[in-house]
Image (cartoon, helix red, strand yellow):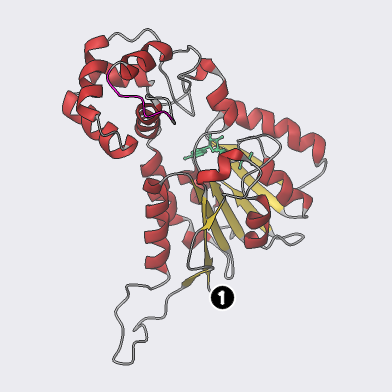
Amino acid sequence: MDEHLPVLLDDVLALLAVRPSGFYVDGTLGMGGHSSAILAAGGRLLASDRDAFALARARERIASAHPGASVELHHAPFSQLPALLDGRRPDGILLDLGVSSPQLDRPERGFSFRADGPVDLRMDPSSGEPASAWLDRVPEAELVRVLFEYGEERHARRVARAILAARPLRGTLHLAEVVAGVVPRDGRIHPATRTFQALRIVINDELGELDRALESLPGCLAPGGRLVVISFHSLEDRRVKDRFRDLAGFDAPRDLFGSPIVEPAYRLVERRARKGESDPNPRARSARLRALERLP
Ligand SMILES: C[S@@+](CC[C@H](N)C(=O)[O-])C[C@H]1O[C@@H](n2cnc3c(N)ncnc32)[C@H](O)[C@@H]1O
C-alpha cells in the first residue's frame, strides 16, 4: 500500500456512497487512507486493524487531519467486527485485504525476502506464533499442501523438502536463498514470492479470517448498506465472489417461472469485479473489487 494512494479510492467511495453522518466501518485500517477519505466525506467511522503499529500511525494521522471527527479505532482482526459493532448497523463496510507496504518494507516484520529479518510474517506480532516456530514443527506433507494451495507453487514438494532440511532458518534472506536454490527463475518475480505468500496466508489464517467475515458481516449491515471487498489474489476473490453470489440468490431454488422461491436479502451491486489495472497505485494492478448490498 502506498500511504498516499489508497487502492481504488474513487470506486470505494462511490460504492460506499458515503454521506454525511452515515456510519462506516473499515476493517483494514492500514495507514488510514480509505478511512481518511470516509471522514473527509463527513462519515462517522469505526475502524480496526490487527497490526498495532499500523493502528498507532493511523491514529496520529487521523487525529491531525480530522480533529473532532467521530472515530472509534480498535486493535482487532476483522472477524471480530460483529462483536465490536454490538448491534450498531453500518451503512458501509470496507475490507482492503492483504498486507500493507509498511509491513512489507520493515525487515523486522519478517515479510521481506529482499532485506534480512526474522522469519515471522505475523500481521499481529502479539498473537499466534512466528512462521519460524510453525516451520520448526510442520510435517512435510502439510508444508507441501500449504505451498501448493496458498502459494500456487508448482515446485511445492521440492521447496518443502529444501526448507525442512535447512532448518533452523537464520532469517528471511536465508529462507529466500533456500527457495531460490530449488525453484527455477521465471524472470518476472523473485522465486521466493509464492513461498512467502503461502506462509503469510497460513500464519495469519487469512482465508479463515475472510471466511468468518464473509459469513457474519453482511448480516450486520443497515438496510441499503454495502459490503465492499478488495482482494489481491484468486484464492480471496473466489471466496468473495461465491459468498456474494450465494447471498444474492444466484443458486437459490426457483419456481416454474424462474423466480427465486425465497426473495434474496442482498444484491450484487455489479455482476463483475472492478479491476485496478488503471489505478495510479501499482499495488492495485492485481486488485479485484466487489460489492454486496443489503436490500432495504
Ligand atoms: C492493504 S492494507 C490496508 C490499507 C488501507 N485501506 C489504507 O488505505 O491505508 C491491509 C491492512 O489490513 C490489515 N489486515 C489484514 N488482515 C486483517 C484482518 N484479518 N483483520 C484486521 N486487519 C487485517 C493489515 O494489518 C494491513 O494493515
Of residues 94 and 116, the one drawn nearer to the viewer in this rendering? 116
Residue at image position (36%, 82%) is 260
**Residue 185 is inside the magenta segment:** yes
Residue 38 appears left or right of 160 = right
Residue at image position (49%, 59%) is 273
Residue 209 in the image: state x and y as whole percent.
Answer: 41, 43
Q: Quadrant of residue 188?
A: top left
Of residues 292 and 283, the one drawn nearer to the viewer in this rendering? 283
Report the magenta residues as a range: 182-187
Q: Residues within 10 Å of mark 1 (few under 14, many from 20)?
A: few
Q: Is residue 218 above or below residue 57?
A: below
Residue 171 appears left or right of 143 = right
Q: Which residue is mark 1?
A: 296
Query: Is the shortest distance between ligand 1 and the CB of mark 1 under 8 Å?
Result: no
Residue at image position (29%, 92%) is 256
Q: Quadrant of residue 132?
A: top left
Residue 148 in the image: state x and y as whole percent.
Answer: 26, 35
